[in-house]
Amino acid sequence: MEQRRSFLKMIGLSVLGTIIGRAIIGREMLWLMLSKLTKVQAAEAPKQYGMVIDLRRCIGCHACSMACKLENNQPTGLVDGELETPNRRINWSIVLGREDGEQEKGKYPLLSKRFLPRTCMHCIDPPCTKVCPVDATYRRPEDGIVVVNYDRCIGCRYCMSACPYGARYFNWKKPDLGRPENPQVPVRPVGVVEKCTFCKHRIERGLEPACVETCLGRARIFGELSDPNSKVSKLIRERGAFRLLEDYDTKPSWYYLPW
Amino acid sequence: MTNIEDVILNQLTKTTKRFYAFIGALLVMVAWGAFAWSIQLTRGLAVTGMNIPVYWGVYISNFVFLIGISHAGIAISAAVRLLRLELYRPLTRMAELLTIISLMLAAMNIVFDLGRPDRVLNMVFFADLSSPLVWDFISVSTYFILSTAYLFLGMREDLSRLADRLPGRRWLYKALSAGWSGSEQQRFGQERVLRWMAIIILPVMVSVHTTVAWIFGLQIAKPIWHESGLGPYFVTGAIVSGISMVTVIAWILRRLLGWGKFFTLEIFRGLGNFLRAVLLIYAYFMIAEQVTIRYGGESASLEVLEFYSTGAYAPYFWSFVILGTVIPFLILCIPRTRSIGGIVLASILVTVFMWVKRVIIIIPALMHPVLPPGIGMSTGIYAPTWVEWSILGGSYALGALLYTIFMKFFPIIDLEIGK
């Protein structure tokens, strides 16, 4: 009898707790907490920047990667100390490919080579920002750029594991540029994660990202996806653009025009 | 029956040379680990074997293993209380202590893995509820606080008795017993609190390893992890490794202290039987995983599965299958080998190879990112460096040190047994 009474008391208390809890934090807060546990549709940004890559124009020259390194204070890998291996380099922008010849198309003399440049996809539904335990990486609500707060990042590398595109890089050691740094971009400290910022410091001054400006074949087109009349929006509509790993429903704002 | 109580108390008062030598050896190992960590702190994680795309290495694998080890302790203790399994009473405190120390080591392993250990408190100040890592942080800290409180409350009576028996350390035990008088009312209240705590701890325990599994299983970018079964799979593995670790430690205490009358063959048989059953469930999960992925043939998962079961990691995988499941299972089945020695041998095999299995779960999946790496980059290779091994060794030595020191100050067996 005594036991049953205490059991009922327990149930009563927990119901009461729930009611009081809801009264204090409110229905909206409760919904917010619940929605954190599930995949939610990303909020529509007033402005959404995006990139279109015309794959037929890409010649695989890596000029974009080099321009990116210089613009954004990434070590070039030429100054490596004993601790640097190719697998620890920082390459915000990179040209994907395999060395087993898979990227070749056709037979001699009608032979072409295919390349797949990639940086951060600035997904509209990014898997990386969701897993960050300290909210150090987030999608900027004003223009949809996914950025990292280098002062808050704890370096757990969870976002790197969660990103299907491998677009995120970690500072395994203290960065050694071996050249004067670009003062507009902070040099990241050891132990934090970094990635492409769409050259936000250039966009804010009305310039295009460094990779777009450098591209020899003019394969990169940068613009506003949110504007249906922009060049990028038109190209996407007219040329049957695709995105990388669309199955994962991350909604990248990077589009490729097919070969 | 004060005889038995004296035996337990002897352990607290009589200190041999061997004990000091053991503590000394552990301190040397801890110092070596600390030295290795200082190197990692000054030069960055570049001194480890981790790279792109193997972002996580043995620290995280070891974290998963240690969280698993933490599972058996409180589970045994709570089960003993709730189901009144008086036979296993001698195991309760040593198992609870194992839980608490392995949780501390697990938390340390996370800190080793961070690029910025100086910012670890950001996990509290800026906790973002959408991250499974935060769920895990909440659930592990709840588990840690509950377990510590549970151990402490269960020990108060012993502490007050120690205050009477050992006048030299009276002040310590008196303070820690927190006003225990042993009155009927106090005893009744305490027992009720502990029962409720035992009931609450069991689901929290399941949540702990489920959220650990979800750190991995909720990522879409790693198809082999992205399975609904990962939670139960991890929980089962945790119970397997936890039970076998408890068996090993019970055996060490039996041998070192000559406590054959507390840790009896019957207890080892019981642990062995339980281990046998959970091992079978674990094997079932593994077979289910193999069949699902191989039959479906989804390329990203299959690539990882083949890498570890028939590719480069096959030696580790098959040594786990044979030495970590089949042979222990047979040892635990055949009546002739179900001696204490046999059961302990099986437990040692299971513990060691469950560690290997944790590595097999974590690292091959990271080695195979869904997108090919850039030109000039090799695909995933990973070999831990001496820094990683030293830090791991040092942290285990610290765990052993804490365990030993605890045993020097507090009875590792409930004094109630003496009654």
Image (spheres, rainbow, N blue to C red):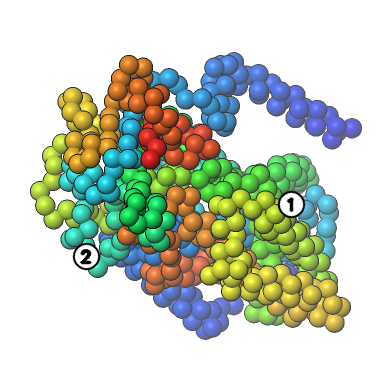
> Left or right of A173: which side holds A252?
right
Residue B10 x, y percent position in the rendering: 65, 75
Looking at the picture, tell me which residue is in the foreground, B83 or A5.
B83
Task: Name the outermost residue toward the front.
Answer: A109
User: What's the mark number on residue B78?
Assistant: 1
Which quadrant, please, contains the N terminus of chain B?
bottom right
* Residue in the picture at 39% in, 65% down: B49
Q: Secondary structure at mark 1?
A: helix
Which quadrant, please, contains the C terminus of chain B?
bottom right
Looking at the picture, tell me which residue is in the foreground, A53 or A180.
A53
Residue B25 x, y percent position in the rendering: 46, 78
| Residue hosting label 2 | A81
Q: Is residue B165 visible?
A: no
Density class for disc 1 (Cα within 10 Å; few <14, some 14-19, many ≥20) is many
Chain under callout 2: A
* Residue in the picture at 33% in, 29% down: A50
Q: Is residue B380 visible?
A: yes
Residue B111 x, y percent position in the rendering: 42, 54
> Which callout, 1 or 2, points to the residue nearer the camera?
2
* Residue in the picture at 66% in, 61% down: B242
**Which amino acid, mark 2?**
Gly
